[in-house]
Amino acid sequence: DAGVTQSPTHLIKTRGQQVTLRCSPKSGHDTVSWYQQALGQGPQFIFQYYEEEERQRGNFPDRFSGHQFPNYSSELNVNALWLGDSALYLCASSLYRPGGSYEQYFGPGTRLTVT
Amino acid sequence: SQQGEEDPQALSIQEGENATMNCSYKTSINNLQWYRQNSGRGLVHLILIRSNEREKHSGRLRVTLDTSKKSSSLLITASRAADTASYFCASWHSGYSTLTFGKGTMLLVSP
């Protein structure tokens, strides 16, 4: 049973470019959340997808957008990259429950470096 | 913005000693969770304690929760070099179905 997978592992982009990160949830999970973790900081919630719709969003600009596919996999897109977007991007999957899905399973992350 | 703060920011101990990390949060929670992260990799879930619980054990881990003080502590007993990692507390808030993390404690366990 595969856990949460993310691709690519590492990515280097230039300021102003656009990037797409991918996540496949753990088998049986239907909800995907994305987090940004800057160096030396804890993860910060970006947004959450369930039933192919964005259900919750953290304090991130519209340059950050996402998508969830019918197979529950998800993409995170970041436009007009800033140097400050350099971070580890973590995907977490869970099974939706009314009131919230407490247990989230995290992928290994994608390390994005913006130069 | 991040909800809580962990204390200390860094902790260095010898194998066999106990390690205690503290976490504070700001608003009411449904539950509080602790995670471990090795060398900037993915997060591993360690333990969850609900708001109506005061203490919970899992192997060498002991977690306490004091909702009146909005604080939690994680105790790792008989530490091992393999426990070297960053530890994060994360709170789950009623009505906002996602996790809010603190800044973490870096634990170094020397052989």
Image (spheres, helix red, strand yellow):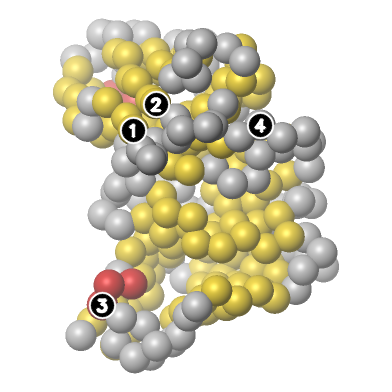
Q: Chain of mark 1?
A: A
Q: Marks 3 and 4, Cα distance to the nearest angstrom? A: 36 Å
- Residue A84 in sight in this render: no
Q: Secondary structure at mark 3?
A: helix
Say which residue label 2 marks.
A24
Residue drawn at (30%, 57%), measured in percent from left and top? B38
Q: CA distance from mark 3 to mark 1?
A: 27 Å
Amino acid on which the number 2 mark rests in the picture = Ser
Distance Cα–Cα, label 1 vs label 2: 5 Å
Query: Is residue A96 among the parts visible in the rendering?
Result: yes
Gap between marks 2 and 3, in whole Å?
Answer: 32 Å
Q: Is residue A61 left or right of residue A81?
A: right
How many neighbours does mark 4 have within 10 angstroms: few (below 14), some (14-19), or many (20 or more)?
some
Query: What amino acid is labelled 3 in the image?
Result: Ala
Marks 1 and 4 close (CB-CB < 8 Å): no
The residue mark sitting in front, 3 or 1, is 1
Dot 3 and dot 4 within a common chain? no
Judge whether A37 appears above or below A51 on screen.
Answer: below
Q: Is residue A114 left or right of residue B10?
A: left
**Secondary structure found at label 1:** strand
Relative image position of residue A73 (x, y in whole percent): 44, 20
Indicate the chain on which mark 3 is placed: B
Q: Are marks 4 and 2 in contact (CB under 8 Å)?
A: no
Closer to us: A88 or A97 = A97
Would you say the residues marked 1 and 2 are in contact, meaning their CB atoms lie under 8 Å apart? yes
- Circle 1 sits on which residue? A5
Residue picked out by circle 3: B81
Residue that badge 4 annotates: A96
Q: Residue at x 33, y 20 (%)?
A: A21
